[in-house]
């Protein structure tokens, strides 16, 4: 797992930001499927003969899903959405309680049989949480480990009373608009295993329970396992050793050495005596904890071992990893068989009766035959081999060309995912993003609406990007990443309000064509229109029927900041315009860094109106509720307007001119025409063909600022004023298209840091 800046690692003190940002994640039209690799699996088997079994999957798309399993089908019955980064592991404990951990540094508890209810968020880790382990019979104990070298043991039974306020730093009630009213779990406590034998107490306590901390791990933890009784915990990671802990005291019992690389998978038998470990050194090792030694080594894989699953009697182990292969090994006889080979590295395994579920870095999950009740049936098919005890022995056999033949060619069932986005390019108009997914399909997204506007199929990404190139310059007002397998659009206070466009360029009907539209402001209005409607309903005021935002609405708590400025141009403009209307069929999800309960994620249509400035960044609410925008980059462009060399036609200006960066060249042409027409004697100097006669312009009207409406032809003009001379504007001796903006001219033609110089000339009629 690589350290990648995530959408929601707000609690990591090593990456602070002065102002919180708002992120929205664009969702695929088929929201029942994962769109990124599957990191974890958890099975809930029914105790009733005719009850349904459920498979829970946790993905790099930040969500968990519950699948109702049938013999030949799996149906998505719930999506659990609240984590803001990869879901790395999940376990089932207690009375249908699902516990998940994420790279957003949190653990979350859910009602496993609900429609997706997040009961509580637990914030204790300071870095990515990579793995979990749960006890079997003693289902109150859950352990978590992460990249910070921390291991925490969580006891769900210890405190039955609600979480006290003094413990908010450790365990958060479901807040930030996450519904936690139903099926609340008892408040949890934790014991910490951190970095030496010294025992320390946490300052936060719950109902008299004193969590115990002990130190041990110096590096990242990638694997945990616990015995059924919950008394023995084993952990492994980049230190290449297996550490054994007593969960009741938090003390380190011993450590087992033998692996030569990162330990990625661990299993304990029900008694806690035997331990299996899988490592990036490609070896599987069987340890006798009582004897404190390795009793067997199995050279089965040709690359890193990432996943292990054992039969109930701990007699056989299923293993998968980076070599895309799933093996079955008899721990006693060392006999091994290659069950199947996939197209992606295997991340986790879950044995289910006579089948095994396989999760990989792909967004699909496959079920393969496994003969879990009688694994010997596999070996009776032949094609087995004897596992060596040295890592190079398996690699040598592979190089000699004697690779075993997979027993199974096709899975018995596949839960399909959607291809994840792996490449993207923000187009120059700063509204469209071109993407390429794992199936090589290229699509064009409109991020101000959150939808795919064009599906080009399997074409060259590079060629399509070149084809869609536009010579336009629009300031960057957002950033994008595809870490979650889809587009995550990040808005921050420094850049969000930088970009403007004319309403005519956005094809907004009924709005004056010269009105400027702030892309960031309108996008925020579109994202929060459902929230505002629910908020007004809660506050007792009538909800708008057409999705309009009230420009006069004020926040319940003052959000006045001296640095903010009122957007006068749209002060009374409350409508959410079509270019900013987000889909309600596949709505985007908001990701925000709440100050009370940490980061969270929720669909915009699920916001219930209770969210406030503790949940949303203040500058977002100040924009939507009070129409105030944070200071922007300079939206003006300074330039000089001069006649072309050798031209006898001149207009008088007061030196440097200033205009909005988005001003089109045709407006500059209008300005020149207006000056020429007004400053010259119309009937003496105007030829019958409508062109201006050569001559020196007068000095009657000076307009130092070129405005959006500096020249408008209309019925108020006299007949001679309608006879417009034909004018060309040049920059660096290149004739400019009337549709170009000043910003585009500066970026692609002028290409200098000093003030822009434009030249004009009269074009004789042909």
Image (cartoon, rainbow, N blue to C red):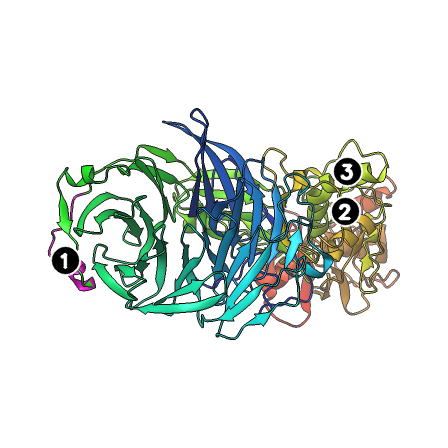
> Secondary structure under badge 2?
loop
Provide the residue designation for mark 3: 533
Q: Which is more foreground, mark 3 or mark 2?
A: 3
Which numbered disc, 3 or 1, marks the residue that appears first in the sequence?
A: 1
Provide the residue designation for mark 2: 514
Which quadrant holds the N terminus?
A: bottom left
Q: Which is more foreground, mark 2 or mark 1?
A: 1
Residues 14 and 428: in front is 14
Residues 8 and 666: in front is 8
Task: Give the spatial CA distance, label 2 vs label 1.
Answer: 70 Å
> Secondary structure under badge 1?
helix
Say the numbered circle drawn on residue 512: none
Say if 689 sits above or below 152 in the image: above
Quick one: label 1, few (<14), some, or many (20+) residues within 10 Å? few
Residue 517 placement (x, y as % from top left): 73, 48
**Residue at point 22%, 49% (across, down):** 329
Which numbered disc, 2 or 1, marks the residue that appears first in the sequence?
A: 1
- What span is colored magenta in the figure? 391-405
Residue 151 placement (x, y as % from top left): 49, 63
Residue 106 placement (x, y as % from top left): 57, 56
Is 401 one of the magenta-colored residues?
yes
Provide the residue designation for mark 1: 399
- Give the mark count: 3
Task: Give the spatial CA distance, label 3 vs label 1.
Answer: 65 Å
Residue 240 is at least partly visible in this image: no
Task: Give the spatial CA distance, label 3 vs label 2.
Answer: 30 Å
> Secondary structure under badge 3?
helix
Residue 470 placement (x, y as % from top left): 55, 51
Quick one: label 3, few (<14), some, or many (20+) residues within 10 Å? many
Quick one: label 2, few (<14), some, or many (20+) residues within 10 Å? some
Which numbered disc, 3 or 2, marks the residue that appears first in the sequence?
A: 2
Residue 651: name its quadrant: bottom right
């Amino acid at each position: 797992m690589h350290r990648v800046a995530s959408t929601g690692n707000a609690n990591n003190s090593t990456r602070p930001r002065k102002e919180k940002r708002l992120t929205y994640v664009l969702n695929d039209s088929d929201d029942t499927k994962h769109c990124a690799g599957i990191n974890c699996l958890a099975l809930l088997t029914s105790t009733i003969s005719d009850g349904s079994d459920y498979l829970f999957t946790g993905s790099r798309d930040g969500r968990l899903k519950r699948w109702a399993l049938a013999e030949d089908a799996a149906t998505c019955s719930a999506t659990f959405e609240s984590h803001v980064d990869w879901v790395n592991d999940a376990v089932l404990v207690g009375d249908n309680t699902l516990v998940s951990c994420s790279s957003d540094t949190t653990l979350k508890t859910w009602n496993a049989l609900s429609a997706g209810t997040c009961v509580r968020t637990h914030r204790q880790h300071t870095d990515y949480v990579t793995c979990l382990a749960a006890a079997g019979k003693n289902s109150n104990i859950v352990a978590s480990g992460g990249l910070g070298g921390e291991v925490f043991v969580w006891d769900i039974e210890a405190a039955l009373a609600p979480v006290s306020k003094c413990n908010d730093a450790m365990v958060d009630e479901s807040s930030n608009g996450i519904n936690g009213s139903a099926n609340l779990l008892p408040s949890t406590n934790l014991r910490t295993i951190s970095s030496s034998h010294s025992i320390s107490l946490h300052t936060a306590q719950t109902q008299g329970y004193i969590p115990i901390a002990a130190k041990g791990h110096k590096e990242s933890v990638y694997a945990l396992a616990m015995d059924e009784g919950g008394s023995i915990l084993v952990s492994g990671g980049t230190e290449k050793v297996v550490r054994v802990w007593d969960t009741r005291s938090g003390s380190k019992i011993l450590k087992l050495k033998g692996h030569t690389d990162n330990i990625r998978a661990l299993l304990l038998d029900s008694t806690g005596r035997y331990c299996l470990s899988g490592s990036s050194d490609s070896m599987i090792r069987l340890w006798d904890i009582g004897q404190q030694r390795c009793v067997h080594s199995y050279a089965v894989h040709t690359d890193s071992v990432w996943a292990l699953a054992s039969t109930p009697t701990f007699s056989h182990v299923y293993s998968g990893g980076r070599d895309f292969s799933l093996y079955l090994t008899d721990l006693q006889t060392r006999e091994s068989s290659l069950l199947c080979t996939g197209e992606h590295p295997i991340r986790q395994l879950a044995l289910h009766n006579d089948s095994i579920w396989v999760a990989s870095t792909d967004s699909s999950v496959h079920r393969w035959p496994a003969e879990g009740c009688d694994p010997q049936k596999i070996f009776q098919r032949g094609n087995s081999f004897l596992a060596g005890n040295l890592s190079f022995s398996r690699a040598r056999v592979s190089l000699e060309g004697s690779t075993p033949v997979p027993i199974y060619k096709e899975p018995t069932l596949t839960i399909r995912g959607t291809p994840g986005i792996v490449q993207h390019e923000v187009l120059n108009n700063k509204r469209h993003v071109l993407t390429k997914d794992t199936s090589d399909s290229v699509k064009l997204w409109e991020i101000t609406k959150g939808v795919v506007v064009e599906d080009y199929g399997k074409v060259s990404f590079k060629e399509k990007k070149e084809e869609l190139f536009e010579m336009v310059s629009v300031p960057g007002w957002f950033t994008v990443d595809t870490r979650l397998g889809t587009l995550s659009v990040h808005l921050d206070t420094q850049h969000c309000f930088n970009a403007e466009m004319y309403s005519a360029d956005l094809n907004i009907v009924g709005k004056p064509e010269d009105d400027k539209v702030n892309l960031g402001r309108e996008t925020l209005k579109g994202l929060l229109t459902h929230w505002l409607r629910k908020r007004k309903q809660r506050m007792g005021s009538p909800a708008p029927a057409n999705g309009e935002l009230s420009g006069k609405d004020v926040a319940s708590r003052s959000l006045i900041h001296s640095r903010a400025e009122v957007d006068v141009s749209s002060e009374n403009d409350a409508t959410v315009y079509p270019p900013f209307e987000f889909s309600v069929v596949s709505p985007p999800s908001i990701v925000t860094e709440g100050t009370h309960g940490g980061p969270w994620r929720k669909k915009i249509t699920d916001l219930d109106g209770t969210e406030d400035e503790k949940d949303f960044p203040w500058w977002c609410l100040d924009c939507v509720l009070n129409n105030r925008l944070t200071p922007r980059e300079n939206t003006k462009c300074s330039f000089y307007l001069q006649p072309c060399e050798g031209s006898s036609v001149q207009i008088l200006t007061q030196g440097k001119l200033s205009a909005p960066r988005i001003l089109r060249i045709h407006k500059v042409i209008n300005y020149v025409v207006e000056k020429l027409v007004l400053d010259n004697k119309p009937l003496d100097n105007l030829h019958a063909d409508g062109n201006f006669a050569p001559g020196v312009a007068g000095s009657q009207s000076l307009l130092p600022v070129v405005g959006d409406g500096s020249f408008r032809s209309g019925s108020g003009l006299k007949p001679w004023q309608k006879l417009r001379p034909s004018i060309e504007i040049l920059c660096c001796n290149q004739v400019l298209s009337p549709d170009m903006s000043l910003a585009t001219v500066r970026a692609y033609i002028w290409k200098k840091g000093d003030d822009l110089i434009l030249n004009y000339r009269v074009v004789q009629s042909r």
